[in-house]
């Protein structure tokens, strides 16, 4: 009998680094995690210390091995998934970061983005990169960093400086500076990468005055990309074989590997990703087109992505803003304690509204109140709003891609709410599937790595790692569904024009 092999997945998130070790069945063997410092030096600015991220990640790797009583020699491969778009710039000679990492949430480049939009660049840039011109993406953050220091600019031209997203940075550290790479999914979030021609886009680099010498080499999401330096694991080298941005990894971990399959991660906000096969669908409705992954040397696969700003955060607001619940879990029983929403709708546009409406001026709204309204109706309306917003994004995506949705796969904190999942199935009129493993992001990174080293050699063995915990079948009459969506839409229109 051959000895059991394991895959170590690094999930480097916005607030914490987690490591999950999976066995050959795709089950979690052990895990560890730790938070790191968030820096808010000015309003709208969010920074991380890249060195601290590396140190914390390294520590939790050791802790996860120890918790699982494993030796590095038992790890067949490492997979990496990470917070996307965050920018790290470092000195190639010393390996030290230059300044702090600028996090995806950071809005400091809003005026530069406005300038670029006023120049009329957005249609071309969207066509090339699949993204919109927004501070969220890496490009303007890199440009900002380089503008800060004349010496830095001279060094970039001399090739002494490296830029990368967090995946690049971790691989640089894991290989002790031997590899400066990024995977194609992370590249597709920088606003510097042409997702159709699969190359860094010279016209954008030129406009932002970013020298090509600082960019990483773009590699496949599932292939042996590098080996860890022997100093990392007591003289032993482990292949790094899977890399993907967090939402793409979750799509892979949900086994949405064929055209038409979609997942929604119900967290603070929600990310809907819809696999569109080998076609990059250009969105007319300000949805993002992104690279889903590239497996080995196979053709690149694409997805449409819709970000909904406030979903789980609407529940947090009931708790912290209104104080009408103690914790998120109780919303399920509360929602069930009333027969219907009784005409109460809550549009949680608490920070404007994202896909598919993109209206930063929209304000939150609760309507349909009567003297009979009580907190259960508000809890129910908040949960329902999560499902309506998701349905609005799904409808827009299906229309744009010309593909019909057959099911939706759910993960994230709020996917534990049975009322919400059932209501989602009812409103979409397709089944909603919740898998056994909720940590689909880490699982996705592990699967990408495991595929490359032959543990799960093909799509069938990969898909078999996805196990259904519960399927919520739609059970609402069509006329009732249409009426509810009409009412929601009326409330939404009020929120969109405050
Ligand atoms: P993130 O990764 O964005 O921090 P999580 O996936 O951990 O988010 O999910 C946390 C969010 O889900 C919170 O906003 C919380 O309000 C919401 N949430 C957690 N459990 C439930 C539940 N049972 N019902 C409804 N919402 C929930």
Image (cartoon, helix red, strand yellow):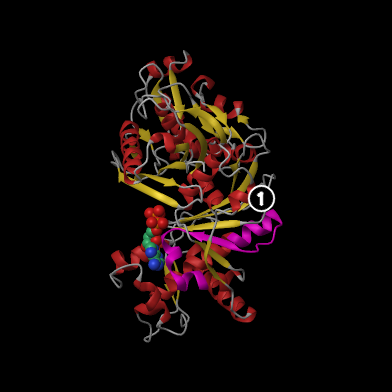
Q: In the image shown, does 293 or 498 lie closer to the viewer?
A: 293
Q: Residue at (47%, 68%) from the top-left corner?
A: 385
Where on the picture, by quarter, is residue 322?
bottom left
Q: Farthest residue toward the right?
A: 402
Q: Is residue 82 visible?
A: no
Q: Determine whether, in the image, residue 388 is placed left or right of residue 369.
A: right
- Placement of 362 over or under 23, stated as above or below: below
Q: How many marks?
A: 1
Q: Is residue 246 magenta?
A: no
According to the picture, the residue beneath numbered tag 1 turns out to be: 276
The magenta span reads 394-422
Q: Residue at (62%, 62%) from the top-left corner?
A: 395
Q: In the image shown, does 284 or 320 lie closer to the viewer?
A: 320
The response on whether ligand 1 sits within 8 Å of label 1 is no
Which quadrant of the figure shows ligand 1? bottom left
x and y, in percent, of residue 202 in the image: 60, 26
- Label 1: few (<14), some (14–19) or many (≥20) C-alpha neighbours in 10 Å: many
- Placement of 334 over or under 75, stated as above or below: below
x and y, in percent, of residue 215 in the image: 51, 25
SS class of the residue under badge 1? loop
Q: Is residue 465 visible?
A: yes
Q: Residue at (55%, 51%) from the top-left corner?
A: 251
- Placement of 497 over or under 93, stated as above or below: below
Q: Is residue 400 magenta?
A: yes
- Placement of 119 over or under 377, stated as above or below: above
x and y, in percent, of residue 477 in the image: 62, 81
């Amino acid at each position: 009998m051959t000895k059991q092999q394991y895959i170590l997945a690094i999930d480097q998130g916005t607030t914490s680094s987690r490591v999950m070790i999976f066995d050959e069945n795709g089950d979690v063997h052990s895990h560890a995690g730790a938070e790191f410092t968030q820096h808010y030096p000015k309003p709208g600015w969010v920074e991380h210390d890249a060195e601290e991220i590396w140190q914390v990640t390294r520590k939790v790797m050791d802790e996860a091995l120890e918790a699982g009583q494993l030796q590095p020699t038992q790890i067949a491969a490492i997979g990496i998934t990470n917070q996307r778009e965050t920018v790290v710039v470092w000195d190639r000679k010393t390996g030290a970061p230059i300044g702090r990492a600028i996090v995806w949430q950071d809005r400091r480049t809003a005026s530069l983005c406005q300038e670029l939009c006023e120049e009329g660049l957005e249609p071309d840039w969207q066509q090339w990169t699949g993204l919109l011109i927004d501070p969220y993406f890496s490009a303007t953050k890199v440009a900002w960093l380089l503008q800060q220091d004349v010496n830095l600019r001279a060094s970039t031209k001399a090739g002494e400086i490296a830029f990368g997203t967090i995946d690049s940075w971790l691989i640089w550290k894991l290989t002790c500076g031997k590899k400066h790479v990024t995977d194609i999914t992370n590249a597709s979030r920088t606003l510097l990468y042409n997702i159709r021609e699969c190359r860094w886009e010279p016209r954008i680099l030129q406009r932002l005055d970013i020298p090509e010498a600082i960019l990483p080499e773009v590699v496949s999401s599932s292939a042996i990309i590098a080996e860890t330096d022997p100093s990392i694991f007591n003289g032993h080298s482990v292949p790094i074989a899977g890399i993907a941005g967090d939402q793409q990894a979750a799509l892979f971990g949900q086994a949405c590997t064929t055209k038409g399959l979609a997942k929604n991660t119900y967290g603070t906000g929600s990310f809907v990703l819809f696999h569109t096969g080998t076609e990059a669908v250009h969105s007319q409705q300000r949805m993002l087109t992104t690279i889903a992954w590239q497996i080995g040397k196979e053709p690149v696969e694409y997805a449409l992505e819709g970000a909904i700003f406030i979903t789980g955060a609407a529940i947090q607001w009931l708790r912290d803003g209104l104080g009408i619940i103690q914790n998120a879990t109780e919303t399920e029983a509360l929602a069930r304690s009333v027969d219907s929403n009784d005409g109460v709708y809550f549009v949680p546009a608490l920070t404007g509204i994202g896909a598919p409406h993109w209206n930063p001026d929209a304000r939150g709204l609760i309507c349909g109140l009567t003297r009979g309204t009580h907190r259960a109706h508000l809890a129910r309306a908040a949960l329902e709003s999560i499902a309506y917003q998701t349905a609005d994004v799904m409808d827009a995506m299906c229309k744009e891609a010309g593909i019909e949705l057959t099911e939706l796969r759910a993960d994230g904190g709020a996917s534990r709410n049975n009322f919400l999942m059932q209501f989602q199935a009812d409103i979409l009129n397709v089944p909603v599937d919740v898998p056994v493993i909720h940590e689909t992001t880490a699982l996705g990174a592990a699967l990408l790595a495991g595929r490359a080293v032959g543990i799960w050699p093909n799509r069938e063995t990969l898909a078999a790692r996805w196990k259904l915990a519960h399927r919520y079948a739609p059970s609402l009459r069509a006329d009732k569904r249409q009426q509810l969506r009409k009412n929601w839409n009326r409330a939404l229109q009020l929120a969109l024009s405050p």
